[in-house]
Image (cartoon, grey):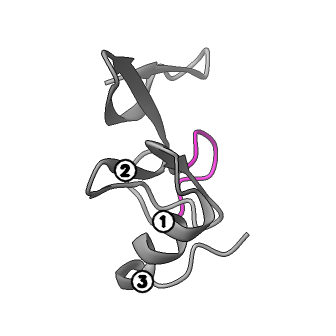
Amino acid sequence: HDAGPARGRPPPRRRWFPGAALVVYGHSHIPEVVHDGERVLVNPGSPTWKRRQPYPTVAIARVARGRVVVSLAELRSTSPRAGTAGVS
């Protein structure tokens, strides 16, 4: 549930998910992508509660040929009256 301090995140996740190439966690709603050797640690942020961020965010993960590539996308309003969101 708790992501813990940023400096100490990789070692526990290495132990908890030894075979994982991608570990997604949350709770803080603060988006980040951390590369830990072959492992990628991702907090996607939040699409609804941006918590000290300029925009709500989501993570997009692509897996190809055994490689994981993750990017964060900000969700910005495309129509103020309709209240819909678009990826920038």
Q: Which residues are magenta?
A: 46-51
User: Which residue matches tag 2?
Assistant: 39
Q: Main secondary structure of the magenta part?
A: loop
Label 2: state its secondary structure. Answer: strand
Mark 3, mark 2: which one is toward the viewer?
Answer: 2
Viewer-proximal residue, 22 or 70? 22
Q: Position of residue 64 (x, y in %)?
A: 33, 15
Q: Residue at x 38, y 21 (%)?
A: 62
Q: Residue at x 40, y 78 (%)?
A: 6
Label 1 CA crowd tier, 10 Å (few <14, some 14–19, many 20+): some
Label 1: state its secondary structure. Answer: helix
Viewer-proximal residue, 38 or 42? 38
**Does 82 lie within the magenta span?**
no
Q: Which mark is residue 14?
A: 1
CB within 8 Å, label 3 to label 1: no
Which quadrant of the rendered structure holds the C terminus? Answer: top left
Label 1 sits on what residue type?
A: Arg
